[in-house]
Each structure stands twice: as C-alpha cells, then as structure tokens.
Amino acid sequence: MSTVDPEITIVIPVYNEAQILEGAVRELVANLRAWDPELACEILLAENGSADGTADIAARLAEELSP
C-alpha cells in the first residue's frame, strides 16, 4: 500500500463485472499515466458479493498495479 496521499480518488462500483473489469482498470490506469505520469491517484473498486470472480480480479489488480 502506498504512503503517498492521493491527489484524486476514483470510485467505481462493480458487481459481476469479471468479463470487463481488468481491461477497464488497465485502460483507466494507462490513461491516467498518459495524462500525468506523476499524478498520485487511487482507484477504489466498490464490490459487494459478486458471484463471478470480480473480487478476485480486483485483489489481483491491486497487487499488480499498486506502487
């Protein structure tokens, strides 16, 4: 987990979005980095009981994409 306070926070509600979640998050991160590579931001995925593995994907992306 980063110790830098984010300049912006993006909150995305997700429920049974396993098919599109990874691509959407990676595209968002790529766009944010292209816009400002030094931007301190956080993306919060608000998930509540998905049955399709959405939470597992979100956890993996958090590990992979966290600074």
Image (spheres, rainbow, N blue to C red):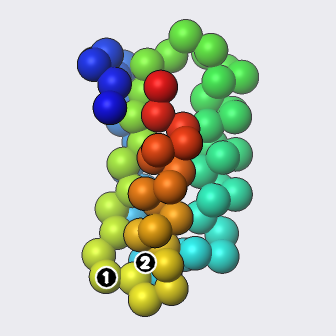
- Tell me which residue sits at (47%, 25%) in the image: 67
Q: Position of residue 11 (x, y in %)?
A: 37, 49
Residue type pointed to by label 2: Tyr
Q: Which residue is mark 1?
A: 49
User: Could you say which is closer to the camera, residue 59 or residue 19?
Assistant: 59
Residue type pointed to by label 1: Gly
Q: Could you say which quadrant of the image residue 32 lies in?
A: top right
Q: Is residue 2 left or right of residue 52?
A: left
Q: With respect to residue 40, does 64 lie above or below? A: below
Q: Quadrant of the N terminus?
A: top left
Circle 1 packing at 10 Å, graded few (<14), some (14-19), many (20+), is few
User: Could you say which is closer to the camera, residue 64 or residue 35?
Assistant: 64
Cα separation between marks 1 and 2: 7 Å
Q: Secondary structure at mark 2?
A: loop
Tags 1 and 2 in contact by the CB under 8 Å rule?
yes
Q: Secondary structure at mark 1?
A: loop
Q: With respect to residue 24, does 1 lie above or below? A: above
Residue found farthest to the top: 38
Q: With respect to residue 53, does 31 lie above or below? A: above
Q: Is residue 43 left or right of residue 35?
A: left
Q: Position of residue 22 (x, y in %)?
A: 63, 59
Foreground tag (1 vs 2): 1
Q: With respect to residue 51, does 20 lie above or below? A: above
Q: Position of residue 51 (x, y in %)?
A: 43, 89
Tell me which label, 1 or 2, sits earlier in the chain: 2
Say which mark, if any, is on residue 15: 2
- Tell me which residue sits at (61%, 37%) in the image: 29
Q: Position of residue 25 (x, y in %)?
A: 59, 51
